[in-house]
Amino acid sequence: MIHSLFLINHTGDIFLEKHWKSVISRGVCDYFLEVKEKAVEPENVPPVLQTPHHYLISIYRDKLFFLSVIQTEVPPLFVIEFLHRVADTFQDYFGECSESIIKDNVVTVYELLEEMLDNGFPLATESNILKEMIKPPTILRSVVNTLTGSSNVGDKLPTGQLSNIPWRRAAVKYTNNEAYFDVIEEIDAILDKSGMTVFAEIQGVIEACTRLSGMPDLTLSFMNPRLLDDVSFHPCVRFKRWESERVLSFIPPDGNFTLMTYHVSSQNLVAIPVYVKQNISFFETGSCGRLDITIGPKQTMGKMVEGLMVTVHMPKAVLSVNLTASQGNYTYDLATKVLVWDIGKLNPQKPPNLRGTLSVQSGAPRPEENPALDIKLKIQQLAISGLKVNRLDMYGEKYKPFKGVKYMTKAGKFQVRT
Amino acid sequence: MTDSKYFTTTKKGEIFELKAELNSDKKEKKKEAVKKVIASMTVGKDVSALFPDVVNCMQTDNLELKKLVYLYLMNYAKSQPDMAIMAVNTFVKDCEDPNPLIRALAVRTMGCIRVDKITEYLCEPLRKCLKDEDPYVRKTAAVCVAKLHDINAQLVEDQGFLDTLKDLISDSNPMVVANAVAALSEIAESHPNSNLMDLNPQTINKLLTALNECTEWGQIFILDCLANYTPRDDRESQSICERVTPRLSHANSAVVLSAVKVLMKFMEMLPKDLDYYGTLLKKLAPPLVTLLSAEPELQYVALRNINLIVQRRPEILKHEMKVFFVKYNDPIYVKLEKLDIMIRLASQANIAQVLAELKEYATEVDVDFVRKAVRAIGRCAIKVEQSAERCVSTLLDLIQTKVNYVVQEAIVVIKDIFRKYPNKYESVIATLCENLDSLDEPEARAAMIWIVGEYAERIDNADELLESFLEGFHDESTQVQLQLLTAIVKLFLKKPTETQELVQQVLSLATQDSDNPDLRDRGYIYWRLLSTDPVAAKEVVLAEKPLISEETDLIEPTLLEELICHIGTLASVYHKPPSAFVEGSRGVQHKRLPGSAGSGESESPDAGSAGGVSEAPPAVIPSQGDLLGDLLNLDLTPPTATGPPPPSSGMQMGAMDLLGGGLDSLLGGDLGGSPAMGSGFGGPPAAMPASFSAPVSGGLDDLFDLGGGVGMPMGAYSPPKTIWLPAMKAKGLEILGTFARRAGVIQMEMTLTNKAMSVMSDFAIQFNRNSFGLAPAGPLQVLTPLSPNQSIEVALPLNTVGPIMKMEPLNNLQVAVKNNIDVFYFSCQYPISMLFVEDGTMDRQVFLATWKDIPNDNEAQFQIKDCHLNSDAASNKLQGSNIFTIAKRTVEGQDMLYQSIKLTNGIWVLAELKVQAGNPNFMVSLKCRAPEVSQCVFQSYEAVLKN
């Protein structure tokens, strides 16, 4: 099981360690730091490393490495999932997950880690339960605590911990009962030079926010559930009902949670909302190149495309750029060689265009690689897969809740090859 | 104010100040001080000096303070064991607290304090907590048993905690069940043979029920535990699969992968024509695809496992090629894994897509990735014949880019393509030759030289090209030197007139100016061949080469089977069996996939688990045993006198003797360091599915044949073959064997199976000294090399004139088997009845006298249960194994048979067998001057009578 945890910042300083069994010297991290040194980019450090006596399993999140040490055969996914859960919990408690915020709350962090794992076995990882055991810090509470001498640590057994619905605490009460569902879809796609789709799929997620009193039992149904290729549910969803009737039936956790994630794969036709015409070329002679990018609407289902942004990782040899954008602004970072063109809203009548020259280091060979374009965009009020919520019903409680469903489509890993 | 204030220090010295604060009267100040101590601890500062002061704060109503003190205790108790005792009273008191949270906290913390003195006090509170009314306390206590076991295993067993833990599997609360399973699994890992997890249909049912209700982590523990169970039949297997499939839709990817493991394993038992089998296959693909949209770390582990799954069951993901397409900002470790899987999934149907992608990748920035992409194009050409042409033209396009490492990598793979499709794509040689100058890596240079030598007759200036390489001969790496030598000899044999000078030059460079023995030896061989018999030289050097096989990097079938049982574990990430690298788990048990239903008669349900062969686990001699010295000193030269002529096909790889394999590998155009080529000789592509059960049933069938065919009235008893040497321990060689006595000759009968990917040859066998001087009477007769997946039956006659040493047990035999790969050691036990000689009938008078003469202390009595034979049948049966009845007496319906046995070394054993009509229990009394043999003789009695 998980033996120890080290938190390491991106420069390689170990700033927190926690051991759940015996203490392991932080020297064990040297193996990791050596690999990290070699990998150059922190993203490229392999997540599973072997040392003479231990295994190191790590994740890289928010510019921090969460490095766990294990000694026996443990499923690596189990460890990785747990580490992400730790990072999620920090995010949830402190609003962000960074070195400074962890240092500022080190005692709470330590208490949390102790509560999440016992002897390497996960103990309490549900945010609802943790918050009952250890209250998140707020300015008001710390003032009150100082005055009254009470503490941040709950002294009662969390109610949900052992019930059949560990995700919900008992006796929730609200004056305004509301339930909101956000259907958010991300398009992962690779387009080739000519704009043809090489690969496209949709990753969808339904984020929910429920503030409902008592023990509400909700049922959510879709107009077209057969669209979904693969689904993963929050533990609250009754799988049998989904299997037989394709409806989501559940007693929700209190507050924010991810109800389900789904996947619409390349087998179905995935609509691509924009087209990209591009040409990036370098001249054989002389030290310059040309860039010309145009983006226009394709299958937008009549909705407005917003937050449009194009990122290009230029070859190392490109010294500077001299471009004109018909809409929006562009920046070129000389150190990282990243060109960012922030367009904003897409005007269907006048497709935005960016063109101009690239100057290349003189004497350097013509760059071989073709930089790929990374596209970001947002479309409100649209689920690009066509998924639609049919209705939401509540049983088990008498009051009438306020219900709302919102749709949004975003670009995920949306890449155009050149 | 934030916690960072705890890190500030003052001039007076931190420890001094903290000490004062810890002993303050004000509660709030105390708490703040403890927080400061904890903060220092988290950054690795040593604050152990404050131990007594912190422990003093333990007696408090404030839960936060208590928890903080506990945190401190866990960290430092080990270094201050005497002080830690001070805390015990508070712990014991807390274990009785009315608040379950405090009870649980106390027992949990006590378990974390790894101090012997404290663990003694832990037993009683722990026992109470394991039976606590509150499930939260029980679940915490379950984990505590695992902690305690880690500190003091003996104590846990003595106190009976393991049984209590097993009882918790039936607990009403699913969280308690999950934690009990997790604790038991962890304990079982350090006790592989303890049979802690006694899995039967009832417990399985309980686990499956708990599975639906417990937390995600609990589900992982339960699924991993389920994966160790072997269902009784396909129906049970299906019902478990049905109850596990909903886990595929869990948001936690570890749950998903553990469920995949259970399904992949239990699927083996389902008949392929079952509708459900097809449904299950379809259900597996979407969750695997979804794993690939998770965080990159999760993707990596998922990809390593998918790599195994597509090798075992390619049909699951054959339509999902596109999800493995690489995005430019994937981390490099994800890119490389995706590429590997793309090649495994490449087929005629999708090759166009794959090639277009690979070509795209070849223009990326990352050098390692680009190289692998170029290699992948070559592998596609070899794997999918229809695409070869397109692959070659893609490679040529890439060569045109003139990017140095791309060109070199392309040339290496083109060489492999030439090997696979000879005389087809030679038109590209001209293009390759243009790039000669840019090659600076040994592998690429060697490949180019091989191409020039191989096609010397079609390259006009081949001699010039090779000569240009020769100039810097001594600066080249060995790989290139060897290749250059061979290539020039080839050239000479093809164009003898113009190149005499060149060949002489290279031969003298290789033989006289080189320090490298490999190079020198090869040089000398060529030199002598050329000078004695140029025709023979031509036949050897220009011999037709075997084609290279398609898949060069498949995992061996037995290893793959084992890895499938370990999906989701570290083993699956490293693609090595757990025994190869997991430290701390002493003697990991090998897992095997269950056989599919109806694959052979050997799968009778009561034959038990996994193939039903290895009921008695084979005892493999530990590699550092003292006795081994004897074995290691034995001369294990191959039986050259009776040895087979080297096979003409040249398929024999890596043979050790110079005359056979040495030359073969030379004339096989061996490219030295190229692993793709080296392992490419693997013969027929390994047919994986179902083949592993074949040798087993074959072996059993043979046994029946032999038993019936020897022409003795009853036939001496010979036990069924058991696995002596599992393939895992012997680099793919599996040995099943038994002993038999046929027409007065003791025989060791073995089935040798090659489960590796390469051909095995040069078998030889030796015994260690043993109790009865058993020794092989001749060499091991394995005449033809053993191809992958082939089995051979061997009968080795034995004599009893070898060196003698008493073994424990008496009938233990330690054996060494050698082949071209390595020497392997194992031990087996022979039935002592093999040693009963045919002239074992003792005269009645002598019998009587001897019986009286042997002291009564030497008499041993045994009972044989459940034997439904009458005395005559028993007597007949025993006679078949040279146990001779010399007198019979009937007293009050009880037959007394008096029997004599003579062993090969002249020891006589006298026996009295009591058979009562209608009573299936026989009594045997054995008398012998060497009473040690009695136990073995009795075992033979039992074996003979019951078979």
Image (spheres, coloured by chain):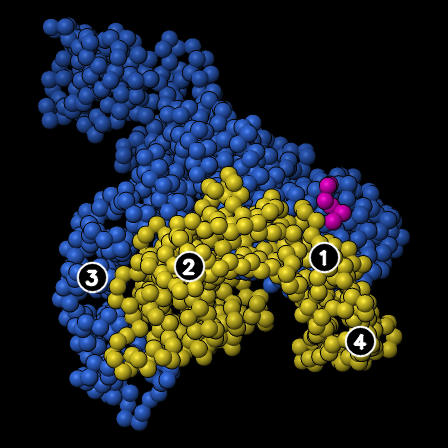
Q: Is residue B453 left or right of residue B318?
A: right
Magenta part of the chain: B348-353
Three-letter code, disc 4: Ser
Question: Residue A312: within the magenta?
Answer: no
Q: Chain of mark 2?
A: A
**Observer-nearest of B246 and B859:** B246
**Observer-nearest of A316 and A211:** A211
Q: Is residue A386 visible?
A: yes
Three-letter code, disc 2: Leu
Q: Earlier in the sequence, mark 1 or mark 2?
A: 2
Q: CA distance from mark 4 to mark 1?
A: 25 Å
Secondary structure at badge 3 equals loop
| Residue B856, percent from left and from top | 10, 23
Q: Nearer the viewer, mark 4 or mark 1?
A: 1
Q: Quadrant of the C terminus of chain A?
A: bottom right
| Residue B261, percent from left and from top | 47, 44
Instruction: Identify the disc placed on residue A301.
Output: 1
Q: CA distance from mark 4 to mark 2?
A: 49 Å
Q: Which chain is blue?
A: B
Q: Residue at x 78, y 66 (%)?
A: A348
Q: Which residue is mark 4?
A: A326
Q: Nearer the viewer, mark 1 or mark 2?
A: 2
| Residue B203, percent from left and from top | 32, 38
Marks 4 and 3 in Cβ contact (< 8 Å) = no
Instruction: Identify the disc placed on residue B195.
Output: none
Q: Residue at x 11, y 19 (%)?
A: B853
Q: Quadrant of residue B786?
A: top right
Circle 3 crowding by C-alpha within 10 Å: few under 14, some 14–19, many from 20: some
